[in-house]
Image (spheres, rainbow, N blue to C red):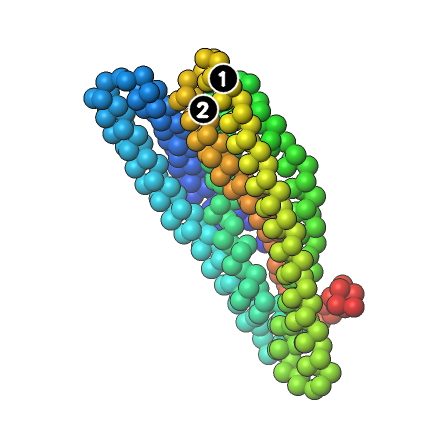
Amino acid sequence: MPKSLLGFVLLISRYHQMAIAALSIILFLAGTAPLEIQRRIINAATERGSYQAILILVLAYLGLVLLEGLTKLMLNVYRGWVGEIAVRWLRKSALAASQRSEEAPLDALAEGVQLSIIIAEAEPVGGFVGTSISEPLLQAGILVAVGGYLIFLQPLMALAVAVVFLPQIGFVPLMQSAINRRVETKITVMRRVSQSMVQHVVTDDALDAQTSRVERLFSLNMSVYRIKFTMNFMMNLMTQLGYAGIFALGGYYVVTGKTEIGTVVAFISGLSKIRDPWGELIDWYRDLRVTQVKYAMIRDASTAQRAEDGAFAPDTSDIDAIEA
């Protein structure tokens, strides 16, 4: 297996990633145009413009929405297909490693690791391959396109919106690092659970050990939930502060005649379009960091299995230290 997660992505789907990237570019370009059409519809209605012109704008808006929806449908199905190819590759690779001669059977730890990879670990790692390149390209493209459009309409209001998102650049990486440490520990404990199941040991001590591992998994999952949802709470709070800034500053500009009501409506829609891709970009970053941890552990397990039979025994000291 390649050393890095990116190398694995390119090994599995380098040509498909180019096609997915092209669809992503089309999607974020198609998603920006409706903002301008919304602004023109609102301004035409408030200024008692021609109804025929409004109807034409509405039809154009519907056409763009349909194009955006169909492109997103194609993109999602394509990315899902690429992800499933990667999952299948990982599972077949783990199964192939288990087909060894009777003279060199796998020990319980190695067999438990393979079981964990096939059942639980391959799915998230392989699934990430489909979105690994297209997701940041798509979401960053939307942020740049919509942000540029908002700056063109009203630079000061756009600056107020941008300030709201700056604190997230600081607290998101810190909280994600804490999640990553717990995910790595969780995978290690899960592998030990699989090892114990493979050994078929049913003594009281073995059952107590498994029960302790289950409790450990529960504690790790709850810790991840607390950090994850606290992060979501803080991000949502920042977004609502952005809406408040638009209402306050936009209302002042409308009252003083410095802007049109359609511009304020465009900013409200624009913030929604920024909030969603920003959240998706944060989710992608979280998935990237977690998947890097998971891929490294799968890669290391694969490397160990390719070693000479009997050359060394798997080192379980890290697992024992974590469980302790």
- Residue 69 in percent (x, y) is at 34, 40
In this rendering, the answer to whether 3 lies above or below 315 is above
Q: Is residue 60 left or right of residue 13?
A: left
- Disc assigned to residue 287: none
- Residue 43 in percent (x, y) is at 35, 20
In this rendering, the answer to whether 239 lies above or below 92 is above
- Disc assigned to residue 264: 2
Q: Nearer the viewer, residue 61 or 93?
A: 61
Dividing the picture into quarters, in which one does residue 269 lie?
top left
Q: Residue at x 70, y 54 (%)?
A: 181
- Residue 207 in percent (x, y) is at 68, 81
User: Identity of the amino acid at label 2?
Assistant: Val
Quarter of the picture holding the N terminus: bottom right
User: Identity of the amino acid at label 1?
Assistant: Tyr
Q: Nearer the viewer, residue 221 or 200?
A: 221
Q: How far apart in space, not on screen, are marks 2 and 1 (Cα)?
A: 9 Å
In this rendering, the answer to whether 187 lies above or below 246 is below
Asked if marks 2 and 1 touch (Cβ < 8 Å), the reply is: yes
Q: Residue at x 68, y 64 (%)?
A: 219
| Residue placed furthest toward the left | 52
- Residue 8 in percent (x, y) is at 55, 49
| Residue placed furthest toward the bottom | 203
Residue 145 visible in image: no
Answer few, some or many: residues within 10 Å of disc 1's Cα (few below 14, many 20 plus, some between 14 and 19): some
Q: Nearer the viewer, mark 2 or mark 1?
A: 1
Residue where numbered disc 1 is placed: 253
Dividing the picture into quarters, in which one does residue 98 lie?
bottom right
How many numbered marks are there? 2
